[in-house]
Every structure is written in C-alpha cells, then in structure tokens.
Image (cartoon, rainbow, N blue to C red):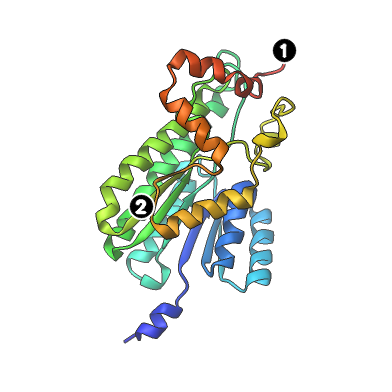
Amino acid sequence: MTSPTNRRATPRIALVTGATAGLGAAFARALARRGYALVLVARDAERLAGAAASLRAGHGVEVEVIAADLATDGGVDAVLERIGEGANDAARAIALLVNNAGFGTKGSLVTSDPVAQETMLRLHVLAVHRLTQGAVRQMAAMGRGAVITVSSVASYLTSAGNVNYCATKGYQRLAMEALAREVAWRGIYVQALCPGFTRTEFHQRAEMSMRSIPGWMWLDADRVVADSLDAMERGSPTVVTPSARYKAAVLLLRFLPRWAVHLASGRYRETRQAPA
C-alpha cells in the first residue's frame, strides 16, 4: 500500500496544449517551477522535443510529449487516450488541463480561406470541448482537479475581420463559466483566462499589423500566467482578466450598449483587416 508520504511525493501532472510557444510555453515553464510533471501537446514534434529537453534540464521535472494536431479528430483522440490513462492509474492522472492551443486570422469571411476558418472552429471549440469533458470525467472520479482555458478579452467583442475568433473565444469563456458552476461541488476548479494584447508569437504568426497598439496596452506572458495560476491556487475567480487596465476595459464592454462597443473596438479591428 502506498503511504501518504509517497502519495504527496508523486508530482501533479499538468497537460498543456499549444505548449511550445507564447502563453503555452509560459505555462509550461511556470508549472515546472511549481513542481508539476508535464504533458506537452503541439503539432511540431521537433520543437516539442526541444521544449521538453529544456524543461527537464532546467527544472528537473518529468516531461512527456504528444505531437498532435488538435484541429483533427485523430489528434484529439491521441490526447484523450493519454488523459484516459489516469482512470486506471492514479499516478498517471491529469491534475490540471490547460487548453491553450489556438490561433488568429484576419480578413472578411467573404474572402478569407474557408479551411482556416473551419480549423479555428474545430480547434477553439470542438477540441476544447472534447478535452475538457475527458479531463473533468477523470477529475470527478478523483474528487479534485483544475481546467484553465485561454480565452481572451476579445470574447467580449464582435469585430469585423475577426468574426470567428471573437465568437469562438466567447464560446470558451461562457462554457468555462457554466462548467465552473457544474463541477465546483466535485472539487474541480475551472477558469477562463481572458488576457488582452500579450507579447507572444501569436500576432506575427497571423501576420497582423500591431503598429496601432500603444505600448501600455501590452501584457507580459509570464505575468499573465502567474496571475492565472495564482487564481487557480486560491480557487477563484472563474474569469481571470490580468491587469487593472483590462479589468476596466471588460467592465465597460459588459455594460456599454452594443453600438458603443462596436465603435470602441475600432483599433482592435485595424489589426485584423486584410491588406488591400
């Protein structure tokens, strides 16, 4: 029989999607510093291997990798298979799921690539739903666990040139708010992390022009992650919006008339317009 001391010595396991860049990489580093063993998920196997090696060397933690495209059923199935291992082996159970994988697009639905738009819907909505359901089923059996889904301040907006990004981030926030109420009594904490503009590779990958965004609006990725994990360890709140300036912005967005929100989102729209 495993002693209580040995149970405490078993590291908690965090599964992070989109783990090789941006907020995903920041989550992986922060969780390693906090003593979590890691399961890292991303599409690029070579980059995953490099990230895992760096975390093992720098923090002495166990790191597994899963190279998977979460916009595909097969990719999600591979991660669900790993989550399911915790059902039969408590030492393999996922204590924290971080749904971070995501990307942005720009341009009108009239002219934008339909494949990219469908990929976004599958990644931001279907993959988040399936992985979260798989994780909370395992966590409910254990009577503990946490889910953090990286949404966005954009979840409060509607923006031309960014139709599905705002809509899918809105789904993520609302789904996590509802789920938090559904599973709190089971000992599971659920969070929707809603940062504003954060210095990562996200905008460069989407080829968005950020020249119109002033410096004071930018957040540091490590600070965003620290705010998220501190809230998780306190057990509240469900919606985490890092920085006072974005908390104030969200307050306005929630209570302004929709026509006023549309006018106020002009600078955000500028970053999502496709070049003429």
**Residue topped by disc 2:** 134
Image quadrant holding the N terminus, namely bottom left
Residues 141 and 219: in front is 219
In this rendering, the answer to whether 147 lies above or below 200 is below
Question: Which numbered disc, 1 or 2, marks the residue closer to the eye?
Answer: 1
Q: Could you tell me the amino acid type at mark 2?
A: Gly
Observer able to see residue 191: yes
Residue at image position (71%, 29%) is 210
Q: Position of residue 26 (x, y in %)?
A: 61, 54
Q: Could you tell me the amino acid type at mark 1?
A: Ala
Decide: marks 1, 2 in contact (CB < 8 A)?
Answer: no
Residue at image position (57%, 28%) is 116
Residue 8 falls in which quadrant of the image? bottom left
Residues 101 and 47: in front is 101
Q: How many marks?
A: 2
Image quadrant holding the C terminus, namely top right
Residue at image position (43%, 16%) is 257
Q: Position of residue 4 (x, y in %)?
A: 35, 83
